[in-house]
Image (spheres, rainbow, N blue to C red):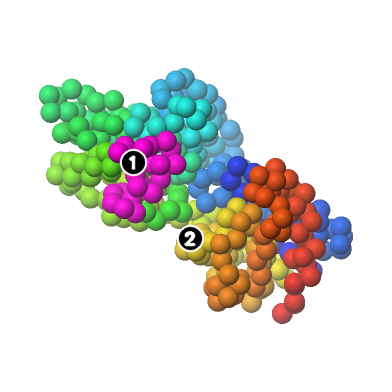
């Protein structure tokens, strides 16, 4: 019997690699003859670089950049063995984890540091740059990263603005260009939100980054102003594109200012891992995946959605584990998942699940195997 374990990380709890290790221990405690193939996954956010490292031969490049409030910080990205492809995690320089809770406010944060990472990779010789969009502390519409790569944004007096969220409303003119025609930029994200409006970057994500209700409104108004000015002066309007609202509008900024393409984390990861070939070559009997919270959003374009399609195509049972389950059994069965379980019963609270995830996942392996029926 061969089991393919391909989970995403559980946010603020356990990495995808650690989930694979824990499940493997639990499975082998029951039957050590079971063959396990583990592939760590990422949706473009947390764990993006680690997921890439597990699939591609890379070199880690360290350099200095700026954090979301402009402080010097050492960051890293990956270059593949040919030096032609770079992999950057936006959260490395522009993420919430760069800041203490008291410092978090997307009115005052910027993606300049991520722009400096892109520039460093280009100067290193990269011709294709992949950027994992997730975990950002920002809502600057990507003007920060654009500012590091040749653009500037002016107010009504012609003064160059600091590229932070609070200044989006003040933008009157946009100057400069991304003068690297030989470089292809690809943003990787699994959110499909547009840039503006009630389902856009500010209203959906800015409160999680420290914005008050009035600041959320100001940020959304600023993003609308940015998109209007870009449409008028640059002739482009990507504000309604799925993913434009990723990472505080960085998805929009990549498309508008760097001529980037956006791909889903699912599509990026499946191509990177050559999942189709893996499934066909090793003869998988069961697929186990996992997410920190499994709900309706998980069924729309995320990892488990893509894996379900692979499982159906190859007639392989697919099961999932999660920290919190927001679906009923009829819902996940109708979607095409054979079995889903939380890693602990209702008597174990969220804090304990986060703290003891590895042990709980190891223990839940027996439940997964008991539900398996060969096809």
Instruction: Name the residue nearer the viewer: 213 or 283.
Output: 213
Percent position (x, y) of residue 194?
32, 53
Percent position (x, y) of residue 42?
56, 50
Discs 2, 1 touching: Cβ within 8 Å: no
**Is residue 214 in the magenta section?**
yes
**Residue sitting at 69 percent across and 58 percent down?**
346
Percent position (x, y) of residue 6?
65, 57
Q: Is residue 152 above or below residue 319?
A: above
The residue labelled by disc 1 is 213
**Residue sitting at 50 percent across and 30 percent down?**
101
Q: Earlier in the sequence, mark 2 or mark 1?
A: 1
Q: Is residue 326 above or below residue 185?
A: below
Q: Is residue 40 above or below residue 30?
A: above
**Residue sitting at 36 percent across and 37 percent down?**
212
Local packing at callout 1 (Cα closer than 10 Å; few below 14, some 14-19, many 20+) is: few
Q: Outermost residue, left direction?
A: 157
The residue labelled by disc 2 is 297
The quarter of the rendered structure image containing the C terminus is: bottom right
Is label 2 in a helix, a strand or a loop? helix
Quarter occupied by residue 207: top left
The quarter of the rendered structure image containing the N terminus is: bottom right
The magenta-colored residue range is: 195-216
Mark-to-mark CA distance, 2 and 1:
24 Å
* Tag in front: 2 or 1: 1
**Residue sitting at 55 percent across and 72 percent down?**
331
């Amino acid at each position: 019997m061969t089991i393919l374990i391909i989970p995403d990380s559980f946010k603020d709890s356990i990495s995808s690699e650690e989930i694979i290790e824990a499940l493997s221990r639990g499975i082998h405690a029951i039957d050590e003859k079971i063959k396990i193939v583990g592939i760590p996954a990422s949706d473009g956010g947390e764990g993006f670089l680690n997921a890439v490292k597990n699939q591609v031969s890379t070199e880690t490049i360290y350099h200095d950049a700026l954090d979301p409030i402009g402080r010097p910080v050492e960051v890293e990205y990956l270059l593949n063995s040919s030096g032609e492809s770079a992999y950057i995690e936006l959260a490395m320089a522009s993420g919430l984890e760069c800041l203490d809770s008291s410092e978090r406010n997307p009115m005052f944060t910027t993606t300049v540091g991520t722009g400096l990472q892109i520039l460093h990779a280009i100067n290193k010789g990269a011709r294709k740059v992949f950027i994992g969009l997730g975990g950002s502390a920002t809502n600057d519409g990507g003007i920060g990263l654009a500012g590091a790569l040749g653009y500037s944004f002016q107010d009504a007096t012609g003064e160059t603005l600091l590229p932070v969220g609070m200044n989006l409303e003040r933008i009157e003119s946009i100057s400069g260009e991304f003068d690297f025609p030989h470089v292809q930029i690809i943003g990787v994200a699994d959110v499909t939100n547009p840039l503006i409006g009630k389902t856009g970057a500010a209203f959906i994500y800015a409160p999680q980054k420290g914005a008050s209700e009035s600041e959320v409104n100001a940020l959304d108004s600023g993003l609308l102003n940015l998109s209007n000015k870009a449409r008028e002066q640059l002739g482009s309007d990507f504000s309604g594109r799925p993913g434009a609202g990723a990472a505080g509008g960085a998805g929009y900024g990549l498309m508008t200012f760097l001529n980037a393409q956006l791909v889903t984390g699912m599509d990026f990861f499946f191509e990177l891992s050559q999942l189709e070939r893996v499934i066909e070559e090793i003869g998988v009997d069961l697929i186990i995946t996992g997410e920190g919270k499994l709900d309706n959003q998980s069924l729309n374009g995320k990892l488990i959605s893509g894996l379900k399609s692979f499982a159906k195509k190859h007639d392989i049972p697919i099961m999932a584990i999660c920290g919190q389950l927001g679906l009923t059994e009829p819902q996940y069965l109708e979607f095409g998942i054979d079995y889903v379980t939380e890693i602990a019963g209702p008597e174990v609270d969220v804090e304990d699940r986060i703290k003891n995830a590895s042990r709980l996942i190891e223990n839940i392996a027996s439940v997964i195997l008991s539900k398996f029926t060969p096809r």
